[in-house]
Amino acid sequence: MTRDDVLAALHRNILETLPDLEADELLPERNLEELGATSLDRLDILFGLQEELGVRFPVESLSPNRGLASLADLLSDSSEPR
Amino acid sequence: MNSIDTRARAVVVSAAVLHSAAETLKEYDEFLRAGRSALVAGCPDPRSAEEIPSSNLNGFDVRQWAERHLADAEDARRRLRRAAARATLPVRTAACVAMAAVRAARLTPRERANLILLVAGNNLSLAHHAAAVLEYNRDVRTVRARHLLDCLDTDTVGAVSEAVGAHAEGWTVGSASASGTTALIQGVRLIEAGFTEHCLVVAPATDLSPVEIAALRLSGALAAVGDATPEAACRPFDADRSGFAYGCGAAAVVLEAPREHSRAHAPAPLGYVLGHGQYLDGRRGTAPDVEGQCTAMRLALASARLAPENIDYVNAHGTGSVLGDEVESRALHTVFGDSESPWTNSTKGLIGHCLSAAGLLEAVATLLQLNGGYCHASPWLRRPVRPGPRFTGREPALLPLRTAMSNSFAFSGINSSVVLGRATGKKHS
């Protein structure tokens, strides 16, 4: 699983969870808080990612104020097989 | 009858509907005028091979609805999608009709913020509940945090208030199949009591799970397709009726306090709520009661200060159920008598029984018929259950109408009736 796989999955799960967003709004430096995700939304994005990628992430890994590119870096480092 | 609008308890400023038969008031009006059934054969209980006549909104998509109805309103589209696109079917449908009704009411941002929001119905998303439990049984990891919202009827309050910007107060009004009518009545009362100038009443589509469908089937309440075509299988007030057709639809209305001078930019009103009556049979169960139904209708007439002969048209509860239609036809006969009885039909024969949304979809149908001067046809009514009520037949009745009654009689002995008045063509004064 490469960092790009993680970023693509992150984008897909954000768009599914926040249906008012368009793909071109998911700029690398924007964070989940700016995109309008609530804490419940972040949990659903995280669980969706875990299911899609077949790995587990620490529950605090989807920080609301970290940019998407930086989140993808963090997630690809912190994943553990389940 | 010239003074009718001064008697209005509330003005119906605008309305919206959502059903497989119609997505706009114009389409709903045309559909009712045509008087054809929108029912199709469906199988909402996957364990049963037997098809039932029904209407559904399977796969209803907020994004696509917004593209069709909010093409010129980017901000409204985005708010609607944010608030509801991922929610359960009841919430999705409610947010769309609420958005359409509020936009049509042409409220200022301040008036929108001061809207009181009433959501009609209870146990709205039983299909979601059942699916979530089945998934959980299969794999506990399928649980989603958003279930916390999806499992509550009040998710509709949150989503609708976000979509339309309503802040005053919001709650659900649950009375099973009478919910649409009782919620309308509660909205009218809040206006009558002076709590608010504007009230948004929203009836989401009810989404039953296969378990409720199976139980309704077992109880003998559902019409069977059998040898008939699905559109002919639900026959309110016909001697050969076999049960009700499960319908799926949503509606919303914006109510306004009657006032001397209409506000700036107000649209021409759709009509008036003139009176309302509610009565409990005072017993548990599903059996309807002539006495209770008569009392609700008479209370509504008294509240409208009208006599039975002043009512031109009755939109009956008329589900097509074997016992229910028999009881209601006796109640109608008792209240309205033999001579000069009002034209009567049941919209459930055309759109199915939309359960907790039925009362509001039918109130809107009633206003459209009042304004259009017609009582829609009852296409499959050949031999009326009893002489007395003047049911429409295969053709609509065309005549000037002023006043109408709309009935909703639910399980648990909950009876409610409203008296509605035609829009007078001018801005209300």
Image (spheres, rainbow, N blue to C red):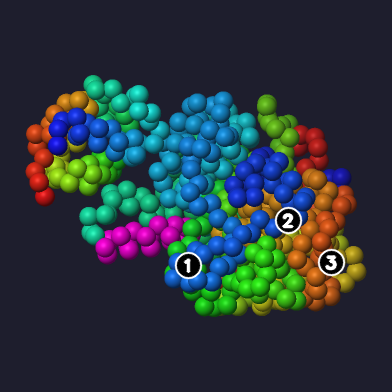
**Res B382 → quadrant:** bottom right
Q: Nearer the viewer, residue B241 or A32?
A: B241
In the rendered view, does B283 fall on the left or right side of B137?
Answer: right
Q: Disc 2 marks which amino acid?
A: Arg
Question: How would you rate the neighbour count of disc 3 (Cα within 10 Å): few for under 14, some for 14-19, many for 20 or more?
Answer: some
Question: How would you rate the neighbour count of disc 1 (Cα within 10 Å): few for under 14, some for 14-19, many for 20 or more?
Answer: some
Percent position (x, y) of residue B255? 64, 43
In the rendered view, does B58 fall on the left or right side of B317?
Answer: left
Using the rendered image of the protein, determine whether residue B204 is visible from the camera's viewpoint.
yes
Is there a contact, CB below 8 Å, between mark 2 and mark 3? no
* Mark 2 → mark 3, Cα distance in angstroms: 19 Å
Is there a contact, CB below 8 Å, between mark 3 and mark 1? no
**Res B345 → quadrant:** bottom right
Residue at coordinates 28% horizontally, 32% vertically from top-left? A11
Q: Disc 1 marks which amino acid?
A: Asp
What is the residue that sits farthest to the right in this orientation?
B339
Q: Chain of mark 3?
A: B
Q: Over which residues does the magenta segment extend?
A: B122-138
Q: Secondary structure at mark 3?
A: strand
Residue at coordinates 52% horizontally, 78% vertically from top-left? B218
Q: Earlier in the sequence, mark 2 or mark 3?
A: 2
Q: How many marks?
A: 3
Q: Which mark is residue B390?
A: 3
